[in-house]
Amino acid sequence: MRHRSLLILTAVLTTGALTLTACGSRDEGSKGSGDSGGKTTVVIGVDAPLTGSLSALGQGIKNSVDLAAKTANKNNEVPGIEFKIEALDDQAVPASGQANATKLVGNPDVLGAVGPLNSGVAQSMQGVFDKADLTQVSPANTNPALSQGDNWGKGDPKRVFKTYFRTCATDVVQGKFAAQYLYNDAKKKKVYVVDDKQTYGAGLAAIFSAEFERLGGKVIGTDHVTVKETDFSSTADKVKSSGADSVYYGGQYPEGGLLSDQIKKTGAKIPTMGGDGIYDPAFISASGEANDGDLATSIGYPVEALPTAKKFIEDYKAGGYKDPYAAYGGYSYDAAWSIIQAVKAVVADNDGKLPEDARAKVTEAMSKVSFDGVTGKVSFDEFGDTTNKQLTVYEVQKGAWKDVKSATFED
C-alpha cells in the first residue's frame, strides 16, 4: 500500500513563494498566527482515506500521527515549537489527494506531511509537494516508481522528487518475499494471478509473478477485476478451470475478500495470497466461506511483537482513540517522528528558531534522519526509501490473521 492510490500534485508556484515568505517571518522572531503559548506552531499535515471502505486504515494513520505530535509536545522534543496536525480525507481518490496537497502547501505552518495510504493517490500529490519544498513521508505507499522513477525495473532507478520519503518497504521487496514464501514454504507451483488494475495492485502482481517464475513456478493464468465491483464469479470460474493450486491477488481487501469467497464457492479449495492491501480483518469478514489458509504479506514485523513498539501501544491505548492503529500505525508514528526530528535539527542549526527557508531545510535534514522508532531503525536511502527491509507473512487461522514468518528480506 500497501496498500494504495497516491497523494496530491498541484501547487502553484506563487503559493510556494508565499509559503516561504511566511516561514521567513519566523526567522525574524515574528510568530504571528503560528504563536501558541509563546511557541511557534508547526503543523504536520496528514492525508489518508478517513471515510469510505479504507477508512479503518486511514483513521489509524491519522491517530498515530496525532499521538506523535502530542508526545513531542509533552516531552518538549523541539524547544520553542508546538506541533499540531491537519488531517485531510482523500477517500482513496487521486484527485482528492491532489487537492489536499495543494491545501497543505497553502498553509505556511505546514512543514511536513504524512501520507497517503494509496500509491495511486501519492502520484497525484508528489509534484505539488516538490514544487513547494514540502516534505512528504508515506507510511504505506509501496510502488517502487514513486521513489525510483518509472525505469526502476530496467535497472535505471532515478529519484524524481526530492521531497518524497517512506517508512515502509516497497513492492520490489514485498512481491519477491511473497513469491519466495508461496513457492519455497507453501510449496505451491501453479498460481493464477489477478489484479485490480490500480497502481499498487498491478505493480505488486507483476513483481510477484516475475519472481515466482524465476524460482521455477508457473503463472498459469491472469485476470483483472474492477474496484468497487462485487461480482467476480467469472474470474473465479477461470481460476477453478485452470487447475491452479493457489491464487495471487494484487489489490485491496474489499475486492480481495470477495474474490477469495467466490473462488472457494466454485469448489476450488486453494489459498488466495496478497500483499498488505488485503491484510485486514475486513478481508476475512468479507468472505462468507471459511478462508483459513489464505495468506498476506505486510511490511515490517508484527507491531505487537516488537519491544520497540511497547510504549507506542500503551500510549495509543491511553490516548483513547476510537479506531485501532491498524496495519500502518507504527509506520505512521515513525513517519511523523522523522519530520519532528528533521524540524529539531533545523531549529538547532538556526539558533533555536525556524529559518526563512524552513521547508527546504526540513527536506534537506530528512536525508540525515536516523533514530530507533516504533518499527525499528528509521533512516532513508538515496531514494528516500526506508532502509528497513523487514516483512511478515500472515495466514488466516480460525478466522483471524496469524503471523507465520517474519524475516529481513535478502535479495
Image (cartoon, helix red, strand yellow):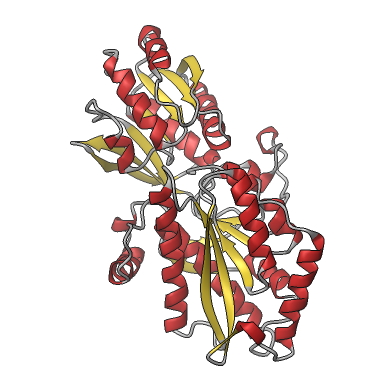
- When the figure is inspected, residue 238 is found, relative to residue 308, above or below; the finding is above
- Residue 376 visible in the snapshot: no
Please name the residue shown 81% across and 61% down the image.
13
Residue 217 at x, y percent in the picture: 45, 19
Name the residue nearer the viewer: 324 or 160: 324
- When the figure is inspected, residue 269 is found, relative to residue 127, above or below; the finding is above
Please name the residue shown 42% across and 63% down the image.
64
Please name the residue shown 58% across and 68% down the image.
369
Name the residue nearer the viewer: 277 or 322: 322
State which quadrant residue 333 falls in. bottom left
Instruction: Name the residue at the left extreme.
Output: 398
Name the residue nearer the viewer: 274 or 383: 274
Residue 32 at x, y percent in the picture: 66, 86
Please name the residue shown 36% across and 65% down the image.
308
Residue 50 at x, y percent in the picture: 45, 53
- Residue 26 visible in the snapshot: yes
Question: In the visual, does 310 lie left or right of 95?
Answer: left
Residue 407 at x, y percent in the picture: 39, 46
Q: How many marks?
A: 0
- When the figure is inspected, residue 69 is found, relative to residue 11, above or below; the finding is below
Question: In the visual, does 46 lie left or right of 104?
Answer: left
State which quadrant residue 79 falls in. bottom right
